[in-house]
Amino acid sequence: MTPWRKTTMLGPTVSVIVAAYNAMPYLTRCITSVAEQTIGRDALEVIAVDDGSTDGTAAELERLAKEYPGLLRVVRQENSGGPAAPRNKGLDLARGTYVFFLDADDYLGPEALERMVAAAEGNGTDVVLGKMVGVGGRQAPTSMFRRNQPKTDVFSSRVYWTLSPMKLFRRELVERHGLRFPTDLATGEDQPFVAAAYLHASGISVVADYDCVFWVMREDENNLTRRTSGAEPRLRYLARMVEFLVENVPAGPNRDHLALRYLTVEVRTLVRSHLPLEPRESQHKTLARLAEIIDPLWHEGMNDRLVAMARLRLHLIRHRMLDEVLELARFEEESERSDVATPVLVEGGRAYARYPFFRDPARAVPDACYDVTDQLGTRHHVHRAELRGTTLHLAGHAYLHRVETRDVTTHLLLRERNRGTEYRLPVTHTPTPHLGTDEDHGRYTYDHAGFDATVDLATAANGTPLPDGLWDISLTIGTQGITREVRIGSKRAEHLPGTPTTHLLTGLGDQPRAVTLYTTKPHGNYTLDIGENKHPVRRHLTLDTPRWSAGEPTVLVIEGHNTLATYPENALTAVLTGPDATTVSFPAVPVARTDAFALHIDLRHLTPGLWRGELRLGPWSVPLPPLPQDAPPTKWRHHGRHWYAKPETNRNGKQLTVRIGRVQPVRGLLRRLKALKG
């Protein structure tokens, strides 16, 4: 979290506005959660507007005002019939740099306001969404909270799919554009306010890594936002929002992006939850009005962005087919309760869901309304993934949900992530009897969905070695003329690790090359890293501090670890470079059944002079660590002469450096005599 620090601002940093109507017993937790915010009470003001409550809300607000003097301001007014008027009253009184609207049923995570203010201040944004969490069975929006978004906008994100006001707004933005909640809407009053704030904002931040707002389902289900029933109030705010989009967003991809919310979420809710409850005569009027309202938003060019069910629903609404709309609503509800997915017809390389009225001549609904080819789910599982030498072995199964595995044409696909270079490689198709019996009550089976791939990296690039890069591994699953691509690895056998394995391989060029098979984060799909793009070889080589051998004064011992999965035999050596670039090598000695090794550097092999050491593995090298500063010199006798080795500090102090020399007895004697005279 980016730390937030209060600067010299006039007034509070955040004004929290709470509209309260018959809010007991939830009100206490709501106000307390604000008072206990880590941003500190000196940065806050709470304005609670009692909208004519008839329960104990007024008394509890008085008690809380005494408990939190200087923090909580209580305002009372006659019941207005909705949250718009009390929120507007709170806005009129607010003094904070930011305002946050909190329903009296809900509450905040302790760090919510601190994190949201930090996001606004750090990114210069006017609106901040904090992650919402449903409580008591209430469904909170999720699609916009999959990751933190420091600065985004309404067109390149999913923020428009939450239009509740429980967000942080820069008050200057609100006042500059005169934003207030419309009091003539019985429900959906928050949408015009929030939508306008989104469009006018300098930027929008999303805090997704902390539970900021807890959205509570009251036990009596009497939340402010759930009291108004019937289709008419929803038609009113839907018409208002369609008009808003048409007036404020030019026709094109941006308007289409925002329109999807209404053509999917709002229309679906209205025809499923409210239209069936109305009298027959009202149903016809409601459907006709709905068709008129959405007509400016829906055009054929949007069909590729709509799922088949939404396309079918909109077609039936546009043609005022009331009975069919109601039947489709019942079909949807029954399908959601069922564990069996709707069957499909595969024809001409396309898949069509057998939803109601499919190819019914009396209804004449176009096939395009049933086309689910691009919606078909992919299923895969990997039970083998390993590198042996230069050969990659992959095996498992993959299929298209609800499509029988006939005329299978599945291939392995290697695609370089940055350049987009692709190589499509064959697989062996293998039988998978009884696959699919554990889903959809066994209605669909996939008995030829297996794949077995053997890829030689030395020839995978059209007969040549696969170049350096990040090679994402996918399958193009083909059956009955339909092909879908899917990254593989997220579903794999338990014995297949998700940790990277790096190999140094010969046969891929003049020098050994690093090849790492790893799984991506957070999705867990397989990728080949060829050439150390993300997995440096040197990270696999670690060395301990050198020491003199206890039994052999001429031997320097260095222990280390090599966590590479494979590397060329006898390639790991210590190399000491001395005068005139003379080099002497000492092979690493492996420790049985571990990744440990030891270097035994016998100094008798070195001529007089200064020697520096490094560990080499093919073209890679790392400096040998230096001896400790307090390490004593060592001496030995060889061929009748006395020799010594002592550590010396090189310029960076991070590499083993020793000086080898012959002991000079006369010089030593003179030094001792000089010391005695001194």
Image: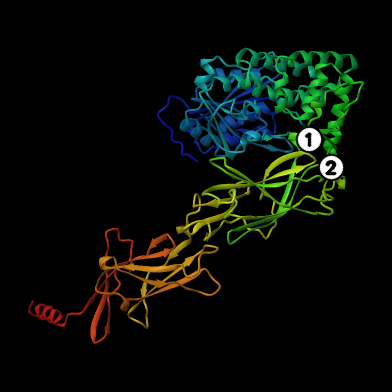
Q: Is residue 345 left or right of residue 150?
A: right
Residue 439 visible? The answer is yes
Q: Is residue 301 above or below residue 547?
A: above
Q: Observer-nearest residue: 331 or 101?
A: 331
Q: Is residue 271 above or below residue 626?
A: above
Residue 235 % position (x, y)? 75, 16
Q: Is residue 210 above or below residue 104?
A: below
Residue 643 image-quadrant placement: bottom left
Residue 99 % position (x, y)? 54, 25
Q: Which residue is mark 1?
A: 349
Residue type at tag 1: Gly
Q: Residue furthest front?
A: 463
Residue 161 image-quadrant placement: top right
Q: Which residue is mark 2?
A: 339
Q: Residue at x 85, y 41 (%)?
A: 340
* Tag 2–tag 1 contact (CB < 8 Å): no
Residue type at tag 2: Asp
Residue 276 visible? The answer is no
Q: Residue at x 64, y 20 (%)?
A: 255
Q: Is residue 173 above or below residue 356?
A: above
Q: Observer-nearest residue: 323 or 251?
A: 251
Q: Observer-nearest residue: 455 or 377?
A: 455
Residue 188 % position (x, y)? 70, 21
Residue 426 % position (x, y)? 69, 50
